[in-house]
Amino acid sequence: MFHGESEDLTGVSTFPCCSNLEADGDDRLGLQGDAEGEGDGDSKADTPDVPLSTADTDNTPQCLNKALEGLPPRWKNYWIRGVLSLAMISGFFLIIYMGPVTLILVVMTVQIKCFQEIITIGYRVYHSYDLPWFRTLSWYFLICVNYFFYGETVADYFGALVQREEPLQFLARYHRFISFALYLAGFCMFVLSLVKKHYRLQFYMFAWTHVTLLIVVTQSHLVIQNLFEGMIWFIVPISIVICNDIMAYLFGFFFGRTPLIKLSPKKTWEGFIGGFFSTVVFGFILAYLLSQFQYFVCPVGFNSETNGFTVECEPSDIFVMQEYTLPAVVQNTLRWKTVNLYPFQIHSIFLSSFASLIGPFGGFFASGFKRAFKIKDFASTIPGHGGIMDRFDCQYLMATFTHVYIASFIRGPNPSKVLQQLLMLQPEQQLSIFHTLHSHLRERGMLPPAAAQAE
């Protein structure tokens, strides 16, 4: 979220008791009865309030509570959040050190936990009617969508491995058909699970599951796609969102006076503006530091000989130091005519601006969602912070922007990816491409003529 604040529900009643269900019913979801009176038999009690969740409990470690017991609640929360934030940042550095495989596994783990937190909220509504298969089908669809996305990734980046293993060749060849068949099976199971008196609620929860898949699984897939473009495209976007989260919280905590948005009463203009400038500076410096190392700037490729990932390459132009002439106004002010920068530092300004100005709307969206269901946090996984989804609500929006930014302004042909696709072809097709490429290079003078080669 934006300031890192959990939602403040002061003044909002926790959860209405069951006796209010008769008066509330479908109107709470904007669902009206059928005009003709026939309908599908949905009762007004079809949409109960969400029961109290574990997200509203305090799971702060006892030792930390005891150490901070003399502090006012505001400062106690500040220190709890600070200690846990440092622990999470340290863990983030450790994961980066462990390499691409670990990063991919962590992204998958975060994705599953975020999905579980959102689906659990829906399940608490759905389970009260003891209707079949909602949670089972939700997890089944998660498996189907992950199979589709990660299967596409394997085919794109692990062509040599697929070519070597016969079972993988079959799965790669019919991947999309298998994915569709799996989804179709889940779709049929959902239709068979429909219960006469609760059609409307069941279709509502079906949509709930699919929107969750769109928000969580699709975005996490884009995070992994960004990672394969180079670890810098994974580290910098995530880091600047974290920086904006922390700095906006600090500026809001110490200087905040002017409310920013009604959805999140604790968000302030002071935090918003302070977070913006801090994030741009941080992103610019981080981009400079990471651009110097091949480990961070090279696309992540799969080495079929070692069966491992490689991050070795000749850095592209955006990671090579260049000299830029400053505008006349800046020259007169600073008395500098030129400045040496990595082009990626300029790109980092656009990434940081998005993370600071647009990224927080992911947090505002999550705030509105939580207020709609009268919950404080998605879960209570991280003391002082809430659930995993509470920490990643802005990250998903940032992942999409980064992917679109790379595709629109950065990405060129990826030799590693092209090679993997070539290895998937039949030998005759590979030989045809070889002869075509050989003739093309000879015409451009990059290879000696055939007569010279014969001599």
Image (cartoon, rainbow, N blue to C red):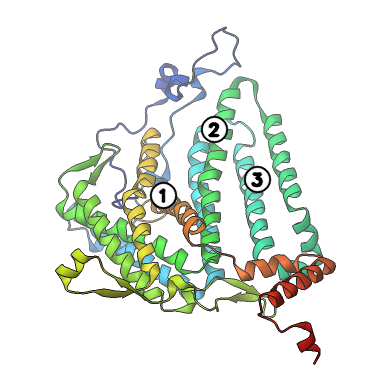
| Separation (CA) of disc 2 from disc 3 | 17 Å
Q: Is residue 390 above or below residue 91?
A: above
The image shows residue 124 at horizontal and vertical percentages of 50, 36
Tag 2: amino acid: Tyr
Of the pair 444 and 412, the residue shown nearer to us:
444
- How many numbered circles does the render carry? 3
The 10 Å Cα crowd at callout 3, few under 14, some 14 to 19, many 20 or more, is some
Counting residues from the start of the chain, the first of labels 1 and 2 encountered is 2
Of the pair 367 and 412, the residue shown nearer to us:
412
Q: Which mark is residue 393?
A: 1
Query: Looking at the image, which residue is at 46% across and 64% down?
Result: 234
Q: Are marks 3 and 1 in contact (CB under 8 Å)?
A: no
Tag 1: amino acid: Asp
| Separation (CA) of disc 1 from disc 2 | 24 Å
Apparent side of residue 195 relative to residue 439 in the rendered image (left or right): left
Q: Is residue 14 above or below residue 86?
A: above
Give residue 163's quadrant in the image.
bottom right
Residue carrying label 3: 140
Q: Is residue 2 above or below residue 442?
A: above
Apparent side of residue 258 relative to residue 388 in the rendered image (left or right): left
| Separation (CA) of disc 3 from disc 1 | 23 Å
The image shows residue 418 at horizontal and vertical percentages of 66, 67
The 10 Å Cα crowd at callout 2, few under 14, some 14 to 19, many 20 or more, is many
Tag 3: amino acid: Tyr
The 10 Å Cα crowd at callout 1, few under 14, some 14 to 19, many 20 or more, is many
Q: Which mark is residue 126?
A: 2
The image shows residue 7 at horizontal and vertical percentages of 31, 43
Query: Looking at the image, which residue is at 15% across and 68% down?
Result: 333
